[in-house]
Image (cartoon, rainbow, N blue to C red):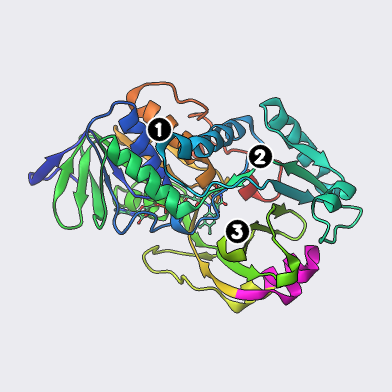
Amino acid sequence: MSLSPAVTETADVVIIGGGIMGVSIALHLVQDGVENVVLLEKEHLGAGSSGKSGAILRQHYSREASIRMARESLQFYRTFGARYGRDIGFEQPGMLFLANESAREALERNVEVQRSVGVDTRVVDAQEVRALEPRGTFGDAVLGAWEPEAAYVNPVRTVYALADVAREHGADIRTEARVSGVLTENGSARGVRRADGAAIHAPVVVNAAGPWAGPLLDEQDLDYPLQAIRPEQAYLEPPGDFGEATTMYADLVTGIYWKPEPAGWTRIGKMSYDGDDDVPDPDDYDEGIDQSFIDFTREAITERLPAFAQATSWGGCGALYTITPDAHPLIGPVPEIDGLFLASGFSGHGFKLAPSVGQGLTALITGGDPGPLDPDLFAVDRLRHDRPVTVPYAYGILG
Ligand SMILES: Cc1cc2nc3c(=O)[nH]c(=O)nc-3n(C[C@H](O)[C@H](O)[C@H](O)COP(=O)(O)OP(=O)(O)OC[C@H]3O[C@@H](n4cnc5c(N)ncnc54)[C@H](O)[C@@H]3O)c2cc1C
């Protein structure tokens, strides 16, 4: 989209998207002293993937760079309430990663890397897995990685809290403000055009539009491998005599993960992207849940926790992931357009990384220290140069 004469406002940075990435980037920019930061969200804050997120904060990754990002982000979320006086629903029940012998090598290696950067985690055998969850059925072939520091937050409260603090530091965060395209001139970003026709002129534009990031790039004839898909989440309430289900699990054997939700429900999702529908238009997708998904998750969790055979179903939802071919995000400058930055493609595991993404992207814009973000590893054009991020797990979502 070329520059229009009808420029109505100016900013130093315009951020497109009010999900966890957009608000984290806004917060870090204003805290770094960038003065005129405008964030435009087409609906309400958290309207995309972020509002439906499990918001599990684990450090169990394979690569040092991701572990460091998850670790520093966990610290950010853990201390957020004390620093800013806002309750983001931070809970730290720990997480157990279950595998069988075929994944032993990857699990042990990953735990070793995690420990080398300071994560409190260890490999546990079947006996210890059973001690951690005495109500479960875990055969002798099961092994696990136990991460007691793993936590979760309330995703909606967190998005709003970061936005509030960003506003207090001077960010201009607007809702019901859809961007229809990025303005460019001579290969440089010049701002954005809003759907209502108004323009905001700025030398730096950040596309943090989650599943809509791809369509916005298409507008510029830029081809990046971002694909929106529709995962489902089921909510099951175990019978009253089961007691509390507190620990979080990622089960590489049954292919599901689960975590506690408020109201005593357990949220269950799938570890792979297999079977998730493609979503060509993220403005038009089915937000409901299929009975077959409820049946699948009930059956899978019952293999581990037999009491769930009698669980009450509270339905669930259809949501959106933005995936890339190597299941890792595209973060950083878009080489074709000077001043245009991208943060998308988090492939279903981005919430836990958002504080580090905010810090890192801010540094890439202002020239500071990107902290734990490795800009080369997540470079937006890495796949064109055949440099995918590789991991040893069969489930890319684990990283
Ligand atoms: C069901 C589910 C469970 C998940 N569980 C976890 C988990 O346990 N742990 C974890 O770390 N991650 C998890 N994730 C992934 C994580 O939630 C996402 O990686 C993260 O929320 C992505 O944030 P975002 O800001 O990039 O995108 P989004 O939250 O989608 O935000 C993009 C925003 O941009 C807005 N927008 C789009 N186009 C425009 C436009 N043209 N103009 C203005 N605004 C626009 C949208 O309305 C939206 O609000 C999960 C995701 C889902 C869907």
**Res 198 visible:** yes
Q: Amino acid at mark 2?
A: Glu
Specify the segment rendered in magenta.
296-313
For residue 3, which quarter of the picture?
top left
The spot of residue 167 in percent (x, y) is 28, 41
Mark 3 residue crowding within 10 angstroms, few (<14) / some (14–19) / many (20+): some
Of residue 285 and residue 358, the one placed in the foreground of this image is 358
Determine the residue positioned at 57% across, 39% down.
388
User: Magenta-highlighted stretch: main secondary structure?
Assistant: helix
Q: Quadrant of the C terminus?
A: top right
- Distance, label 3 to label 2, CA atoms, is 26 Å
Task: Tell me the kind of residue under disc 1.
Answer: Leu
Q: Is residue 205 visible?
A: no
Q: Position of residue 62 (x, y in %)?
A: 67, 37
Name the one closer to the observer, 283 or 39: 39
Tag in front: 1 or 3: 1
Q: What is the quadrant of residue 293 in the picture?
A: bottom right
**Cα distance between the residues tagged 1 and 3:** 27 Å
Residue pointed to by mark 3: 273
x 65%, y 76%: residue: 312
**Local SS, label 3:** loop
Quick one: label 1 or label 3, which is nearer the N terminus? Answer: 3
Query: Which mark's residue is nearer the viewer, 1 or 2?
Result: 2
From the viewer's perspective, is the residue at label 3 or at label 2 nearer?
A: 2
Instruction: Name the residue rendered at 25%, 52% in the picture.
Output: 179
Q: Look at the image and say whether residue 241 sits in the magenta stretch.
A: no
Question: Under tag 2, what secondary structure?
Answer: loop
| Residue wearing tag 2 | 149
Q: How far from the left and from the top, in percent, is residue 329? A: 50, 42
Say which label, 1 or 2, has the lower sequence index.
2
Residue picked out by circle 1: 361
